[in-house]
Image (spheres, rainbow, N blue to C red):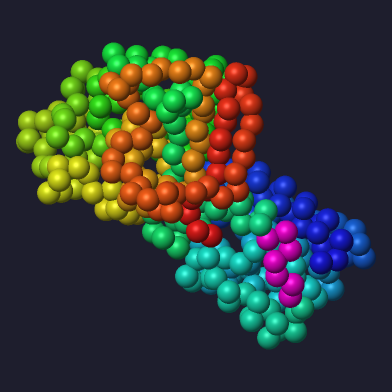
Amino acid sequence: MPSQDSHFMSRALALAARGGRAVRPNPRVGAVLVRDGEIIAAGYHSRFGGPHAEARVLEKAGPVARGSVLYVSLEPCSTKGKTPACTSAIIDAGVRRVVIGCRDRSPENGGRAEGILKKAGIAVTTGVREEEAFAINRDFFTWVARRRPYTTLKLALSLDGRIATRSGDSRWISSPASRKYGHYLRSLADAVLVGAKTVIRDDPLLTVRKGCRHPDLKRVILEGKTRIPLTSRLLSGSGGGEVILAASRPLPAARARKLAARGITCLELPSRSNRVNLGKLFRRLAERGLMRILVEGGGETAAAVLEAGLVDEVHFFIAPIIIGGRSARPALGGRGANLIREARRLRGLRVERLSADIHVSGFLSDD
């Protein structure tokens, strides 16, 4: 890979990262237009419905774009939607070469741009800083290819794998630094998901605090056999974004009316096991435009999403404490692996210190 390509793609990737949540459900894309080794225009996709990164830089450059090289973090779109196809704009502008970070995974665009551009006589190079380009839109690729939200699991646990003592006390296992990082993870998500037992036990608000912001963070609650009291802060309409109650059985009419009056969205997902069908729930959430979910429930909820094959990324905050006791609550419930070779292994492992805690993170899904 020419060093110049890597250099200018690095700039495009930095611009793409600025897109943030404002572009959802579109991907984050950055673009740089180069002529004679100098950047003549740079930009990124900044909001859903707005011009794509390629269109922005081509418009900035105007006639100077003819004969230039376009560096773009993601394969340009080749179909018309809210905005014209970027491949058409690139051809019309007279760009002589296009350098792409990674291929799009969406069914309507994936792999089409290179053929269209080459047919028009434009040279194309794909896969420059590909891993970094893929990572920026990991959630988008999961959403379009698997029709479900990209899912992150977060757990705070002791050295011996407990998330609460035998009395149920869990505040606070992790350090203030770890809890602040947890709020950062919330700020990246479209929704945070917990189980009914967590709501009953902790009565959380599930908002974003500690220096992070996301006033529209949705809160998803799994309600199986256990009914959540209407007096809970989440069901009383206290602060934060939309609350979505996913029920494993039909709601009594009176309860449904009271929840609707408080602005609670109810999704009934009947199940023989009296547990919410997570596959159906995640598809419904994806249809509602939720691209990224953070799971913060207890051991049973964590095990359920893992066993359903729905977890893409994990963050474990391990505190230097030993709780002990058979009755102490384990970090993960469920059936678990029968053999070691069946255990889930992390890829892209990262280990760091957060104050006294050890933060372990990595990925579970296949790219």
The quarter holding residue 275 reads top left
The quarter holding residue 327 reads top left
Magenta stretch holds residue 120 = no
Seen from the viewer's position, the closer of residues 15 and 53 is 15
| Residue at the image point whose x is 83% and y is 56% from the top | 7
The quarter holding residue 35 reads bottom right
| Residue at the image point whose x is 33% and y is 40% from the top | 303
Q: Is residue 242 visible?
A: no
Q: Position of residue 115 (x, y in %)?
A: 64, 81
Asked if 155 appears above or below 283 in the picture, the reply is above
Q: Position of residue 179 (x, y in %)?
A: 51, 22
- Residue furthest to the left: 253
Seen from the viewer's position, the closer of residues 108 and 247 is 247
Q: Position of residue 348 (x, y in %)?
A: 60, 48
| Residue at the image point whose x is 14% and y is 42% from the top | 274
Q: Position of residue 5 (x, y in %)?
A: 82, 63
Q: Where, quadrant-wise, is the N terminus in this rendering?
A: bottom right
| Boundaries of the magenta span | 124-130
| Residue at the image point whose x is 67% and y is 71% from the top | 89
